[in-house]
Image (cartoon, rainbow, N blue to C red):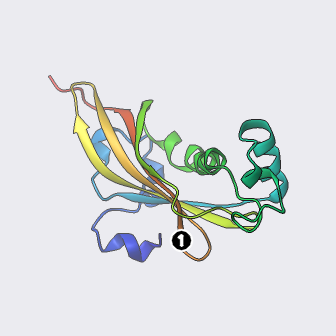
Amino acid sequence: MTNADHTAGGGRDLARLIGEAPWHAEDLNIGDWMELGTVQVELAEVLAFAGRFDPLPIHLDEANTTFGGVIASGVHTMALFSSLASRVFLPRLAIVAGKGVDRLRMPAPVRPGSTLAGAVEITDIVMHSRRADVSYRATFVDACDRVVLSFVAITVVSRRIPAS
C-alpha cells in the first residue's frame, strides 16, 4: 500500500502522529493507516523456520515442483508481519491485549529473496466503558504489489477517559 492508496480514504497517516503516542481508542479514527516498512525473506530463514515449525516439503525441498521451489510457511509469513507491526505500530497503542484475527488470507506464495512491505488500516472501533475493540486490516505485499497476507486483527485498546 502506498500513501496515495490511503489519502483518498480520508484517514490519517499515523506515522505523523508518533510523537502523540501512546494512542488511546479516542485518538484513532476509522481510515487511519500506517506503513510498517519492509522485510527481506531469506532462504536460510525459510528453511530453518520450516524445519522447526512447519516441516512440509513445499517449505523444505528446494527441488519441489509444486510451487517451483520452496515457499515460506504461512505461519512464518505471519511472524514476519508481526515483526514489523510489533516494532512500529503496536507499541504506540495503549494496548491491553490482542483479541483475535478474522478473514486471514494468503493469496500468493512468499518466495525466498522476496521483499515484503506491511501496512495497517483502522477499520472499526467499538467503544466500551474502559476499553475499545480496535479492528485493523493488515496487509503484506511483495515487490510486485501482490498481496501475500491479509487479515483483520482485533486489538483491545485502553480509552483515554473511561465512560461514566
Residue closer to the observer: 36 or 56: 56
Q: Is residue 50 above or below residue 6?
A: above
x, y percentage for residue 93? Answer: 44, 40
Query: Which residue appears at 68% of the width and 67% of the height?
Result: 115
Q: Name the residue at 78% across, 37% down.
A: 52
At x 65%, y 61%, the residue is 110
Amino acid bearing label 1: Arg
Residue 149 lies, with reference to residue 102, above or below; the image says below
- Residue furthest out toward the left: 164
For disc 1, the marked residue is 146
- Classify 72 as above or below 127: below
134 left or right of 41 in image = left
Q: Is residue 162 left or right of residue 141?
A: left
Residue 3 in picture, x, y percent from top left: 44, 72
Please name whichever residue, 27 or 1, is drawn nearer the observer in this view of the structure: 1
Q: Give the image location of residue 160, x and y in percent.
A: 30, 33
Q: Image quadrant for the C terminus?
A: top left
Front in this rendered view, residue 125 or 111: 111
Q: Where 16 sits versus 160, above or below?
A: below
> Most extreme residue toward the front, as rendered?
65
